[in-house]
Image (cartoon, rainbow, N blue to C red):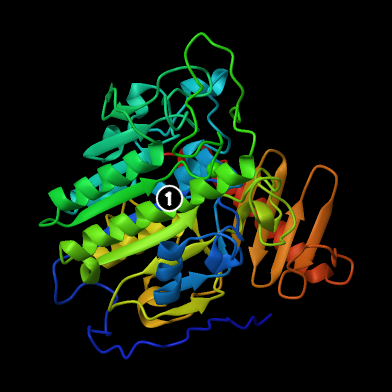
Amino acid sequence: MVLLKKTILVLLATGGLWNCGSPGVTDKAPPNFILIMADDLGYGGLASYGDTSLNTPNIDYLAENGIRFTDFHSNAPVCSPTRAALLTGRYQQRAGLEGVIYVRGETRATGLDTTQASMAKLLKTAGYQTGIMGKWHLGYKKEYNPVYHGFDTFYGYVSGNVDYHTHYDNAGIYDWWHNLDTIQEEGYVTDLITQHSVDFIRQHKDRPFFLYVPHEAPHVPFQGRDDPGYRYPDQEFSYYGPVVDRLRAYREMVEVMDEGIGSIMQALRENGLEENTLVFFLSDNGALAKFGSNGGLNGQKTNLYEGGIRVPAIAYWKGRISPGETSEVALSMDLLPTTLSISGAAISENHSFDGVDISPLLLQQQPLDERTAFWRYRGQKAARQGPWKLLVTESDTALYNLEQDIGETQNVAEQHREQLKELSEALRNWETAVDTVEMKTL
Ligand SMILES: [Ca+2]
């Protein structure tokens, strides 16, 4: 079977400002990386991805002047596992984190094992200053804190969501941290994340840095800047919060995040760093359909239809990335091997990644090699190769051709038995590989 790669890169830049012979760094200091992740932002949830009723000029600027992905996928349809894959460069199953770490119950004691390689750890070893400003969601216990995963600086929260004003999580536990300690800090979470990000850029402008900015927005609770805080300890409160006009609050949450991304870009410009910094924006999973927009895709957060896992993703690097659009399939876990490759850091033979280095696509418009990608979450499984997507749920096994049927409405398994067989076998092999205990640690 020969599948045509569809990479459409509209070359608008004149280019020629850099050495095209290598995606690595040749003539400048190692570049900085800023990885901005929205929380539960659906595929259609930005003006540049279809929702023109939203005012998101700063993200749209990145989309217009960078590469806009139309077939980028989160590794999971929910928060924790996508974040595990993003930071380890491997399927989250290898880290034993296939599901969400909940604020209550037995998963609260679990987290990302610190023996795992992480993007921050590897870049720190390569000489980078490393910071995370925002949501961790890879373990509540101190032993899982970001500082043990290679981050020099952490400001933010460890749970799935906090009150944007009082900073209490959904169990009424205070959840705003600086490294290993909780701190009292007044402010709207999105603005605090922005402020700490801008401070980090200013403080480290003379060193290569990796700044991870996992925003809370537009995850619930629904709170804008002027809405009241409502979560306090020893009180009953709702998950979504008391705001009645949720659509108004949701829009504000997206737009304040966009404003903050504008401030981050401004900080780069003021410090002369825009041409030496790769900025990558993405979401961790699809939206809950009743609140956000999945751009007309089937499904939503928590399931493996495209609406749960196809997300906005934008790569921007002034002078290095030519503006355009790509329909290459890429995943959250690709960003670790990609940043590591661009940093020029040596990669130990002890490290192997499931993600692939997409820097040739970003910097040289080269199509990616064909591969098969896999997902598994709460009894659902999926495999993707080219246009074909196998989706196994508890009640059904379906094959979709996403090029012809992006809405996943036509199960063509009967008409394409070969593809069904091939993907089913690949899925079985993948499950065996990621479920093998000795492969879970490096
Ligand atoms: Ca999420």
Q: Residue at x 40, y 19 (%)?
A: 174
Residue drawn at point x = 23 percent, y = 38 percent:
153
Total tally of numbered discs in the picture = 1
Q: Residue furthest front?
A: 226
Provide residue 285's location: percent of width, then percent of height.
57, 49
Quarter of the rendered structure image containing ligand 1: top right
Residue furthest left as drawn: 206
Which amino acid is tagged 1?
Met
x then y, percent, for residue 354: 47, 56
- Say if residue 393 shows up in the picture: yes
Q: Which residue is mark 1?
A: 257
Task: Tell me which corner region of the image, top left, top right, bottom left or bottom right, holds residue 49.
Answer: bottom right
The quarter of the rendered structure image containing the N terminus is bottom right
The residue positioned 55% from the left and 59% from the top of the image is 54
Q: Nearer the viewer, residue 224 or 80?
A: 224
Question: Considering depth in this image, is 125 or 350 the residue closer to the camera?
Answer: 125
**Taking 211 as reference, is 379 above or below it?**
above
Give residue 305's position: percent from left, percent from top: 71, 54
Crowd rating for badge 1 (residues with CA inside 10 Å; few <14, some 14–19, many 20+): many
Can you give x and y, in whole percent of width and height, for residue 412 in the image? Answer: 85, 67
| Up-down relation of residue 220 to residue 391 (above or below) | above
Determine which quarter of the picture holds residue 11.
bottom left
Give the side of residue 153 with respect to residue 423, left or right: left
Q: Indicate if the residue with disc 1 has its beta carbon within 8 Å of ligand 1.
A: no
- For the C terminus, give its image quadrant: top left
- Camera-side residue: 202 or 359? 202
Residue at 78 percent across and 46 percent down: it is 393
Residue situated furthest right in the rendering: 414
- The answer to whether residue 287 is above or below residue 314 is above
**Quick check: 16 left or right of 221?**
left
Q: Would residue 284 be visible to someone looking at this image? A: no
Instruction: Describe the element under mark 1 as helix, strand or loop.
Output: helix
